Image (cartoon, grey):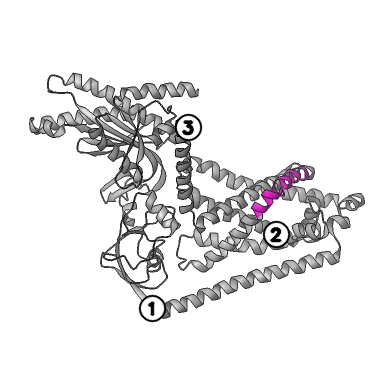
Amino acid sequence: MAVLLHMLKRLMASFQTRLRELFRGTGLRQVRLVCGVILFAYIVSHFLNHALGNISVEAMQTGVYYHMLLWQFLPVAILFYTAALVHAGLGVFALYQRRQFRWKTAEPLQLVLGLSVPMLVMAHLIGVRLGQALYGHEKLYPQELYLFFVVAPNKLWQMLILLVIAWVHGCIGLYFWLRMKPFFKRAAPWLLAAAVLIPTLAALGLYQGGRSVAGDSDDTEWRASNLTQRQVGTAAQGNTLEHIADGLIYGYLGLLGIVLVGRGVRTLRERRGGMISLSYGNGKTVRVPKGLSVLEASLRHNVPHASVCGGRARCSTCRIRIIGDHAALPEPSPREAFVLARVGSSDPSIRLACQLRPPCDLSFFQLFMPHALSANEGSAPARIGQERYLVSLFVDMRGSTQLAEKRLPFDTVFIVNRFLAAVSQAVIENGGQPNQFVGDGMLALFGLAANPETACRQALKAAGAIAVHLDELNELLSHDLRQPIRFGIGIHGGEVIIGDIGYRDHIVFTALGDAVNVAARLQDMTKTLACQAIVSDEVRRTAGLAEDALPQQEVAIRGRDEPMAVRVVADTRRLSGLVDGSERVAA
């Protein structure tokens, strides 16, 4: 019972920690993204319904029944309309908040398209949904297609423009969100095909359905069944709905006008409030009004500044290190603190340029120079940073110092190279990638082409294979070694930043982040704990190993407030068998 209570307490503590991290990492952009995904799901559902017009109007009617069954279900309807209002409101706020528009072409285009959607959709929304709520209208596909193709063909073009604008706006937003995900490169062709086919089929479905309705509308019986007062309402009701729609459109345009006036007033106040100097540490200094973020100031003055996510606080490539006193700077927002914590940065002098809005003169230098992303121009294209889950395996050779003291330099290098070759072979055989060689140690990465569960299992099997390969090496060199080559391994998994790091001809592909640092520190701990490997409980759990498969211990990790649960492995040869056994159980 006590053990069960202890496990429940640990699960609750873990859940609370994850919940706190979730709220810390949630900002206005994340709320807008979630709302946008909900709205895009509605658009996809609606477009697929339109595409049924390529079959028949009856198929469209059947499809819209299920469409409405989902989206008019009360909890879903509340979620949908809340998302619509919040997304539109945050879009208007983004117009006010953004001070610098010299972004890549797609970003201002996305903003303009998003702001135009409420104005275009207002008349359709009022005519269908408010007409149903106020007068009990039952406007479905026959009535709407009759309006577009017979009564007011000009409204058809307005509807098609709305469909294109909403779709393009949503696709741009999804692209900015997904482009840094590990699966995006593989999924991009399929996503592009869907982005082209779905709206095309929807437009063709509307055309085919409209032609069918236009032909049927000449029949008196069809008109009597589909154009009743209950379905389309009276002329007076139509005028009332049109006046409401016009009023809302004018109100929305007035709101945009107020926002633009507010931007102008803010600009005047910032200029009167004084200018500040930003010094880039390389002799470059710019003068900007107070209130601009460091990244916005760089863009305004055409100063190259790395920012893979475009200033959305979804990456840390715009990081800067403050030179001198940073006490006068505002505290990091929850989102900025979350991103910095994710990459293991606890130094208060390191900030995100896209989030820091300095109130006074500031000197700093960039941690990721933008030319590093294209420094190998003319050769292989640089791999820009992206965030993903990887498993880091650090392995280090024990006793290399004593080895070097008693041998010629050439002999020492020969043995170390044979050690690294044996380790690299074990890593490659199990799906990993040797990444960095530091003296007699190596960092290997797992998960570059695999999911987290597979990556954790690959890393554990690689640790077992390292022991086997080194046994063979020790036997081969037994005549020259006074004692067998020993090693220590640390394994940990988590979100890291991967990309090309370096300068000019000295650029390497590597991983940065807390997970990498923890793996290195776990490897160091194998010396004090007298074991061959230390595996974080995160890796053990993700790999699917049983709770009692390996002895557990809690250790203090430098830079972490709370102790970390790890698994101590006295003999890494066991790991391959444990992983194989768990795979058979899962199968």
Q: Position of residue 295 (x, y in %)?
A: 39, 63
- Residue behind mark 1: 274
Q: Nearer the viewer, residue 95 or 557?
A: 557
Residue 62 visible from this viewpoint: yes
Q: Position of residue 342 (x, y in %)?
A: 39, 49
Q: Nearer the viewer, residue 79 or 108?
A: 79
Residues marked 2 and 1 touching at CB (< 8 Å): no
Numbered range of the magenta stretch: 60-80
**Image: 482 above or below 519:** above
Other residues around mark 1 within 10 Å, as few (<14) / some (14–19) / many (≥20): few
| Mark 3 residue element | helix
Other residues around mark 2 within 10 Å, as few (<14) / some (14–19) / many (≥20): few
The image quadrant that residue 474 belongs to is top left
| Mark 2 residue element | helix
- Residue behind mark 2: 157
**Image: 475 above or below 400:** above
| Mark 1 residue element | loop
Judged left or right of residue 520, residue 137 is right
CA gap between label 3 and label 1 equals 62 Å
Marks 2, 1: nearer the viewer: 1
The three-letter code of the residue at mark 1 reads: Gly
Q: Earlier in the sequence, mark 2 or mark 3?
A: 3
Q: Main secondary structure of the magenta part?
A: helix
Marks 2, 3: nearer the viewer: 3
Question: What residue is at 20 percent from the left and 35 percent from the top?
Answer: 440
Question: What residue is at 24 percent from the left and 21 percent from the top?
Answer: 471
Q: Earlier in the sequence, mark 3 or mark 1?
A: 3
Q: Nearer the viewer, residue 436 or 148?
A: 436
The image quadrant that residue 394 belongs to is top left
The three-letter code of the residue at mark 3 reads: Leu
- Residue behind mark 3: 4
